[in-house]
Amino acid sequence: MEDLDTGDGYAVKDIQMAEEGSLRVDWARARMPVLAALREEAERTKPLSGMRVAGCLHVTKETAVLIETIAAAGAELSWSGCNPLSTQDDVAAWLAREGYSVYAWHGQSVEDFYWCIDKTLEFKPTLTLDDGADLIVRVHGERSEYAPGVLGGTEETTTGVHRLRAMAAAGDLKYPVLAVNDAITKWDFDNVYGTGQSTLDGILRATSVLVAGKTMVVAGYGHCGKGVAMRALGLGANVVITEVDPLAALRAIMDGYRVMTMDEAASIGDIFCTATGMKDIIVERHFATMKDGAIIANTGHYDCEIAVEALESTAKSVRTIRRDNEEFTMPNGNKIFLLARGRLVNLAAAEGHPSEVMDMSFANQFLSLCRLAKESESMDNLVYDITLEQDQGLAITKLETLGITIDELTQEQIDYKDDYTAGT
């Protein structure tokens, strides 16, 4: 473990960075009005009084605003980052300076990563908040002694929800979990518009290349891949989609993209971005056929989508050409550029999603914690969806903060909608 600033309840890179972190948090806080409204109410009602929340989620300026809100609701908390390269060190420093328990820094080893998770569990949480399910899996495995005290948990991302549904199906889930990722106000906005913009932001910060005119290969056409493809198209790229789901592939065709296998796309792509949540999407045989100058990035939660070890073992030489950008010279002389070590490029090479879109996702996280604090005893050990009422309520609040009003059905229209006898 490298030299760190440590104290009672924290381990961060450099606590002297706290003032810079404070400015970042101020910026985010001003752009998250839904969470601000929830925080104002929570300060009065204290819906999380007596709760102890262990969080494992990217330590960013937006997460800091969520942490403030959870604390304002009466909870104690302890936090770790959910990816070794996603922590914003100045934000972590600010959280530590403000007295929050935080164990996170950019550039962790795998051992460091799980050490930080374990430290957040030492205060025996009653609720867990996850992004990728590493914390929950830890509580169910190596640190199972903490599981009996946990009332419930939440999960932020697609990968984590898939893991948890598999656990529930196997009968291994020991407490109820709310799938925040599957809220409409999360995956139709955060996953599409947030991932789309922040992924292109990360690629551009790491490369500064012109996207217009290039062929961009997007692996996966779920919500995240759809967002990446949309933004790449907007910058003038010729977008190719690779898929294993025939329905998703058909959607991509109807949306105007070319669809082919990765074996076909590998030789024509200029920029590649994986967004599947599955391992081994770009592997050794693909590297062998790529153009000179091909750029590879990943925006999925884990770094297993790109076979980085195979790329390293095949290359004649490797050098860091610029920040978050490594140049691999292949046996045929072609150069391939890997961004952010194959980690999620939008957070490792940029700042993650814009605050405005995280406002709804983190409002869902907060409301889900409040629901678990109130209802968990009556819930089974399953993965639950967010209620439609919560989704619609957040959408209304978000529209209000944008100064937008929408129509409402009249009573006559409501009666008509439910009148099955009404016809031609």
Image (tube, rainbow, N blue to C red):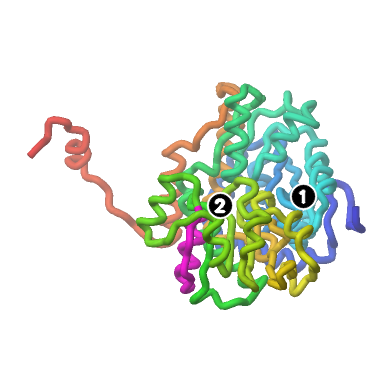
Task: Identify the residue at horizontal 52%, vertical 52% (top origin).
Answer: 220
Residue at left 68%, top 65%?
Answer: 339
> Which residue occupies the foreground of this view, 47 or 423?
423
* Residue 249, image x, y percentages: 43, 51
Q: Nearer the viewer, residue 215 or 341?
A: 215
According to the picture, the residue beneath numbered tag 2 turns out to be 35
176 left or right, relative to 15: left
Give the extent of the magenta segment: 225-242
Q: Is residue 236 above or below residue 100?
A: below
Query: Going by the image, does 89 lie left or right of 186?
Result: right
Q: Secondary structure at mark 1?
A: loop
Residue placed under numbered mark 1 in the picture: 100
When the figure is inspected, residue 287 is found, relative to residue 300, above or below; the finding is below
Three-letter amino acid code of the residue under disc 2: Leu
* Nearest to N terminus: mark 1 or mark 2: 2
Quadrant of the drawing holding the C terminus: top left
Is 229 a magenta residue?
yes
Question: Residue 344's image quarter?
Answer: bottom right
For the residues labelled 1 and 2, say whether their Cβ atoms are less than 8 Å apart.
Answer: no
Q: Is residue 190 visible?
A: no
User: Could you tell me residue 231's position as x and y percent?
Assistant: 49, 66
359 within the magenta span: no
Mark 1 crowdedness (10 Å alpha carbons): few <14, some 14-19, many ≥20: many
